[in-house]
Image (spheres, coloured by chain):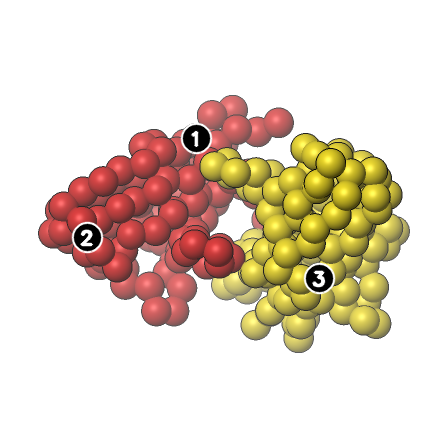
Chain colours: A yellow, B red
């Protein structure tokens, strides 16, 4: 089984400041890693994902994340945030092997990012 | 990008009635659809995995007779909450994918259910 821990439930930050949202995972098998964003009253939208290859992944809206296998982390970063980045962010993992859980996502608890002017 | 719709977006019903929620992939064929439940200020919990033309696979602790899932076509899956009770009140979200584990899941906007 997999588990995901997002270390911060809420992150307040000022506009144009950098931000890092932390995510750690636990799994007995190799995983794929995802970051999703949920704006108020909307569904989840994929920001980026790591499947293989380069450990630094770039996504939409200027976000990037780095996969660190030794620390089992997949932290999300943005060098300069905007007011419009205010939303809830979810880290998720899925197995990258076959079996009954193939394709299923396990989500973290979510981190609410609030960008202040 | 791929679009997934859900209908209705919100529903209020009386205790004991059944409610059907539709999930549609609008511009792609979804071989697999997932149903999640999200409680206030909590994460998404997977309820079941639905593959077109076959029975849904339910997660441990999810009552299959309570939450009926039908995936009749490559673009439509339905979740029926039977004999709904107030504790079934929640935000139900579906997602759809056309591939396996590494493929992106596209999420619907969710359906808020309130059972009185």
Residue A115's spot in the image, x, y percent?
Answer: 70, 42
Can you say whether B39 is above or below B113 in the image? below
* Residue that label 2 marks: B84
Q: What SS does tag 1 mark?
A: strand
Q: Residues within 10 Å of mark 2 (few under 14, many from 20)?
A: many
Q: Residues within 10 Å of mark 1 (few under 14, many from 20)?
A: many
Viewer-proximal residue among A56 and B104 = A56
Q: Quadrant of residue B7?
A: top left
Give me the C-alpha separation between circle 1 and circle 3.
Answer: 29 Å
The residue sitting at 40% across, 42% down in the picture is: B52
In the image, A78 versus B44, the foreground residue is A78
Left or right: A112 with respect to B93? right
For marks 2 and 3, give the CA distance: 35 Å
Give the left or right position of residue B36, taking residue A33 as reference: left
> Relative to B86, is B113 above or below?
above
> What chain does badge 2 belong to?
B
Q: Chain of mark 1?
A: B
Give the labeled residue for mark 3.
Answer: A23
Q: Tell me, for residue B5, which label it has, or none.
A: 1
């Amino acid at each position: 089984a997999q588990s995901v821990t997002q270390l911060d439930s809420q992150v307040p930050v000022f506009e144009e400041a950098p931000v890092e949202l932390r995510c750690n995972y636990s799994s007995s098998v190799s995983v794929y890693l995802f970051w999703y964003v949920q704006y108020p009253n909307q569904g989840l939208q994929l920001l980026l994902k790591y499947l293989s290859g380069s450990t630094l992944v770039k996504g939409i809206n200027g976000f990037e994340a780095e996969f660190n296998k030794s620390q089992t982390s997949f932290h999300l970063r943005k060098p300069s945030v905007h007011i419009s980045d205010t939303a809830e962010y979810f880290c998720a993992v899925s197995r990258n092997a076959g079996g009954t859980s193939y394709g299923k996502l396990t989500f973290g608890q979510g981190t609410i990012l609030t960008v202040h002017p | 990008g791929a679009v997934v719709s859900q209908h209705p977006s919100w529903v209020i019903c009386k205790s004991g009635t059944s409610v059907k929620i539709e999930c549609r992939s609008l511009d792609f064929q979804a071989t697999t659809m997932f149903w999640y439940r999200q409680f206030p200020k909590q994460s998404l919990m997977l309820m079941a995995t639905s593959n077109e033309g076959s029975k849904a696979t339910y997660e441990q602790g999810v009552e299959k007779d309570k939450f009926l899932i039908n995936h009749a076509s490559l673009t439509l899956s339905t979740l029926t909450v039977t004999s709904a009770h107030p504790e079934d009140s929640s935000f139900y979200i579906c997602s759809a994918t056309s591939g396996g584990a590494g493929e992106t899941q596209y999420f619907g906007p969710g359906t808020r259910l309130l059972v009185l």
